[in-house]
Amino acid sequence: MIDEIPKQYNPKETEDKWYKAWEDNNLFSAKPNPQKKPFTIVIPPPNVTGILHMGHALNNTIQDILIRYQRMKGKEALWMPGTDHAGIATQNVVEKAIAKEGLKRQDLGRQNFIERVWVWKEQYGSTIIRQLKKLGASCDWQRERFTMDEEYSKAVVEVFVRLYEKNLIYRGSYIINWCPRCQTALSDEEAPHKELQGNLYYLKYPLKDNPDEYVIVATTRPETMLGDTAVAVNPKDKRYKELIGKTLILPLVNREIKIIADTLVDLKFGTGAVKVTPAHDPNDYAMGKKHKLEFINVMRANGTLNQNAGEYSGMDRFEAREVILEDLKEKGLLEKIEPHNLSAGHCYRCHTIIEPYLSKQWFVKMKPLAKPALEAVKKGKIKFYPTRWAKVYLNWMENIQDWCISRQIWWGHRLPVYYCRECSEQNTKNLTPNTKDGVIVARTKPDKCPYCGSIDIYQDEDVLDTWFSSWLWPFATFYWPETNGQSPPLRGQVSGTVPSEDLKYFYPTSTLVTAPEIIFFWVARMIMAGLEFMKEIPFKDVYIHGTVRDVEGKKMSKSLGNIIDPLEIINEYGTDALRFSLISITAQGQDVFLSKERFEQGRNFANKIWNASRFILMNLEQGQSPSGTVPVLTDLCVFFKKEGLSLVNRWILSRFYSTLREVEKNLENYQFNEAANTLYGFFWHEFCDWYLEIIKPDIKSVHNQVVMYKILEKFLRVLHPFMPFISEEIWQRLIEQGQSPSGTVPVKTSIMIQLWPHIQENIIDHKAEKTMQEALEIITSIRNMRLELDIPPQAQNIEVKISTSSKSKKAALEALSGQIKNLSRLNKLEILDEYRRGLGEFTSVLKDAHITIFLSGVIDIEKHKEKINQKIQRTESEINLKEKMLSDKNFLQRAPSEIVEIEREKLKNLKDEAQKLKGVKDGLR
RNA sequence: GGGCGAUUAGCUCAGCUGGUUAGAGCGCUACAUUCACAUUGUAGAGGUCAUAGGUUCAAGUCCUAUAUCGCCCACCA
């Protein structure tokens, strides 16, 4: 049977097999259980158009670690999965697809187009879900949600109506961010500013009274001059004082515009005179309102100029810019062009430069929602990890602007807004002013107008911002607002669970794991929505992880071609390797710089675990201990009372529990890399490199059998959240083999539902750890000496004497002498309590021990002397430092006495060591 | 313009609340293959902790500047 275990771990043979087993046995599902505390994570829903990238891999690995850990800790752990309909992104993808057939969405019409999107969604929308499964994500898939599910959409409508009724949603004409390519309004967050290399154009606007005189204005977007309706100067500006109130002739259009005074104008910028285009700039818009200027829109939705642009009508905005500059230049009205760096908003979906555009949109009033959300973080009800993100959050929240939520696209939640044609006509005629412009906001389409009774009613064409549904994710996924238990059945039919109970039980959720880019879009808004609609925070902790970058620090993106595909890594190295490598290099909240080679570490670790386990399985007695008195799996505590354990076993057990404690602490503090590295170091460098090597010759002893088995078994459980597949594979083999005939042992079940090992404080033995540490140092020194003295590795006729004046150390060394001989490949070892120098020997000095090696062959005495000399020098310089320190009155007075004691002790040891070294040196003649 | 982060070994990075000799992975050097594992083992080399001040008995760690790189936010037309 053992022979069947291959020498190399093959992830492909285990991963799909175990994932299927977990799913088939419903191990991911969670439901309210009054016996247990809940632990809930809602997944940041990936876009349906998404394909798994490293960011997802990192994000979801972290969540899976948390969920698996808490599940093993005995919590009812729910990881709620789902996808986001991603309005603009998805619409763009499908538009591209139909473009291949030579079609535009307008050719299909709204209804048909949306049907196409649904078809697309059914076909490709589960790609990302399948990929998350490859990653080992233990989501409760029976609960999978989609932001356009029927029930979810009800929540969206409900929220819109409630906010409208509270006067927190309004409609109005404002300058918004317009993407001429997507042809929709965007929120401020969706139009991030990027630096652009542009120009500052100085244009001359002639005075009406005196066409030979000009006011020169500076602009970065000269094409908007066609919509200018004023020129503004600062009232304090002496240069223009005389001109305020005068009239200018707007070139090319020959419109008369006034010079107005406004403090908004910066005296130092440009010429101090600014052209005012109220329909195309937010500042100008404000001035336009204030000074009652005319609003002239010169652009169409697609970014071409409209009929107000006269002869430039039909040109693209950037094409028009060039032509207009040409024309101005011809008329001598272009003063100069200066290079100028500016920043402009870019569409976050298609990267087109945003046009500030006057249009009628729907907005959410944010200040009232922000207030409690600010408090929640300020009072520490919600904590950010790392804490610095709280500042970012607070800063944004304090300066929050109203949220533009209407989008002029087709894919999304249509606004629950209806218009009565009758009323709006009446209203334009100003006959019935109390009909709210015929606007009806309702949960379902009304049969007739509540104002006038007309049945001529139509729904608003626009859809809502995707984030207007995502911000409800922590509770809408539990079928809020249904609360009467009569809600729609869960997908996959989990019987006995009623959604309202779920919401009560699992909300507020525990931890949200996400990336910094999404704090404003999603995290902040979820907090506002949770507090507004649930009257409670949506989550307690927010863990913000870093961005995955390439080795040069660039964000990984398709267009840069610097992507490392997680699926390729899974294919090549295995999922566990991917997860472990990612986690081990991700310091809390720091960005991750990745190259493919990084994943070798995880693969190698998996292989190490595999082979160590293979070794243990090969050497593990079946079922019962050889003596028949000690069942292999008897609880350690009971066992220890009966039998005294060797130092080695006490040491490794203590090390294991110390490690476990460290890992737990790290996980509770969201220090995943620390946890992973602690585990790695323990298993590889302590358990494998030392422990297994030490016990190898005596591996069949009862103690060694029990301890080796117990540590592997417990280690696998601790490893499981990090490397779920390999831990399960080995666990299954181990449990089967280790099972005792008495049947008192854990039944053969999945590792993922086992309990996390309990820290047995009484087994942590610092003294044993220290003694062992020193013994290991001695072995290392002997090995080192062999190399230094060029003793061939095969040579075994080596004699060593270890002399120490410490009685306890002597006892420990005596107990370990067999192992020391073995690991240092010695033929004879003596432990003495006093060092006596003799001829033909070579001695190394440790803190309180001499190691003397006897050789009859040829050796390089000079080389050895040199080494000793170096060591003496190093020790003496250290002694100097310490002496200085210990003669410093300030130090003695102010440092805590323990520290002083430690330093004194250290100095004593150093002096001792120097003494011994000198003795050894003298012994070399 | 405001804010945040980074600067530690050849490379990529850890180092939590100041306190023994600053760590890891990769790479490098030497040696090792009847050994669970060469995706390995043993041993080793390699660091003025960006710079300058300061606080402290004590600074990689705290404070203040400076430099370089990166990110986020902002209505300089």
Image (cartoon, coloured by chain):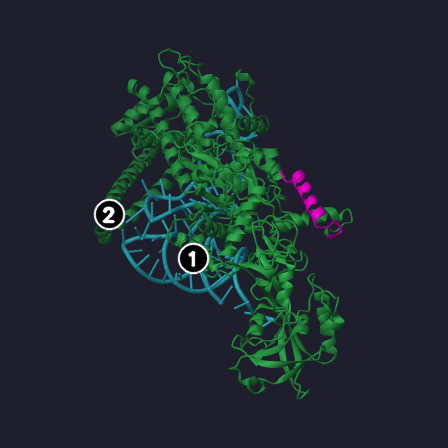
Chain colours: A green, B cyan
Residue denoted by label 1: A371
Q: Looking at the image, which is closer to me, A772 or A11?
A: A11
Type of the residue with mark 1: Lys
What's the chain of the residue with tag 1?
Answer: A
Q: Is residue A122 magenta-colored?
A: yes
Q: Which amino acid, by three-letter code, is at mark 2?
A: Pro
Q: Which mark is residue A915?
A: none
Instruction: Please provide percent x and percent y for residue A83.
Output: 58, 42
- A700 left or right of A49? left
The quadrant holding residue A301 is bottom right
Left or right of A437 in this view: A35: left
Mark 1 residue element: helix
State whether residue A628 appears in this view: yes
| Picture residue at 25% right of the left edge, 49% below the top | A895
A531 relative to A683, above or below: below
Where residue A276 appears, as percent x and y from the top left, is: 61, 74
Residue A33 drawn in magenta: no
Residue stretch rendered in magenta on the structure: A106-126
Query: In the image shown, does A433 or A632 lie closer to the viewer?
Result: A433
Task: Using the image, name the chain to which the residue with label 2 belongs.
Answer: A
Residue positioned most to the bottom: A210
Question: At which x and y percent is residue A612?
Answer: 48, 25
- Judging by the rendered image, the residue that carries numbered circle 2 is A896
